[in-house]
Image (spheres, helix red, strand yellow):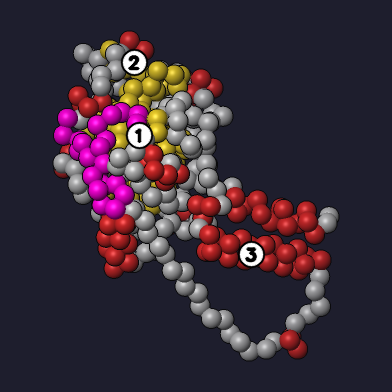
Amino acid sequence: MTLLQLLLLAAVPLVAHSHSRWECPAPRSSSTGIKNGPCGSQPLSLYQSDAATDEIKPGPLRIIFEESIHHTGSPFRISLSNDGTDDDACVLLDHIPHNDCCRPGFFDESSYTKYAVTIEIPNVKCERCSLHLSNPMTDKNGSDGSPSGIGCTDPDGSCFSVYYSCTEPFRIVGDENAVQRNEYSCPDWRSVNEDWPLVWVGDNGEDVDVTTSGVYRRESSIWSEDFTLTTVPNQYRQDAGGLCGEQVTATTTSPTTTSAETTATTASSLTNGTTTTTPTAKEGNNESNESKTPPPTSAGIVVASSLILRIMILAGAITFGLQSLII
């Protein structure tokens, strides 16, 4: 195997991850880089009815999703699939603002930025339903993503790049008044969430309008240390229990950002629309151990080649930003 082949193999784990995914309910795919919506290569139609082992009741439901690479102002949308198919999804909550406070560690899943929101599940009966997560990359839209810009549209619209994630199937057990999901007429999501804010924070701290579903600009707000949004009514923050309710307190916040750094970075992002992070590193032991170093082996060369490439890529990431590496 040539040195070039070894270097290419070493690069694979560095570019295999990307941007956002479900944490709870469980995602169908662990990938955070799915760009073909709504669910990538694992459509709901592939799942048999007995695959839906989790049951959800209509009403408030705590959900959790996470971000693996920071994209300033890139909002989220949550939808509910039809029964047994990902088609004809109902939007449950749109214009969920981005948390600009943190920079998750690209290789450390425990540092991913978590989001916890309580949504409303309609009173339906469904044997194989799924939640869809959409994440338009409005940080790539230039002036169109500014408060005065035209924004971009999704799904099947003009957003330059969108990341998707879908949950594994679950059952919805409605009451005696429930209708079948495939007979349910989706209401406008605003009619169910009338007190959801109409503006978020855009570039340079300016208000950005979020009244139109499916049209996105850079939209941010402040999230708390328990991963809930501080600028919405309590019904969206309270732990509604159920499938995901107990998992929020068990997770840890990103080790890459301290409380003081989070506060400073949040203030900076809401004022300037962008944030910066200064990398730090520990100095190693400078003692010479040359007399104890054995001759290099083939395995050692492979490891060294992989390490060198990783260092080169990380250096490039620090210089140009992770966002310039992966669109």
Q: Nearer the viewer, residue 161 or 299?
A: 161
Tell me, yes or no, if residue 246 can be seen here.
Answer: no
Residue at image mark 3: 312
- Which three-letter amino acid code belongs to the residue tagged 1? Ile
Q: Earlier in the sequence, mark 2 or mark 3?
A: 2
Q: Is 214 one of the magenta-colored residues?
A: yes
Look at the picture and state if 286 lies above or below 250.
Answer: below
Quarter of the image where one finds residue 195: top left
Q: Give the range drawn in magenta.
A: 194-216
Q: Which of 260 and 246 is in front in this view?
A: 260
Residue at image mark 1: 150
> Of circles 2 and 3, which is in front?
3
Horizontal and vertical percent for residue 39?
A: 49, 30
> Of circles 3 and 1, which is in front?
1
Q: Callout 3: 10 Å neighbours few (<14), some, many (20+)? A: few
Separation of residues labelled 3 and 1 (CA atoms): 38 Å
Residue at image mark 2: 181
Separation of residues labelled 1 and 2 (CA atoms): 34 Å
Instruction: Please report the residue visible at 50 percent of the width from the left and 43 percent of the height from the top.
Output: 32
Horizontal and vertical percent for residue 324?
A: 53, 52
Q: Which of marks 1 and 2 is nearer the N terminus?
A: 1
Count the numbered circles shown: 3
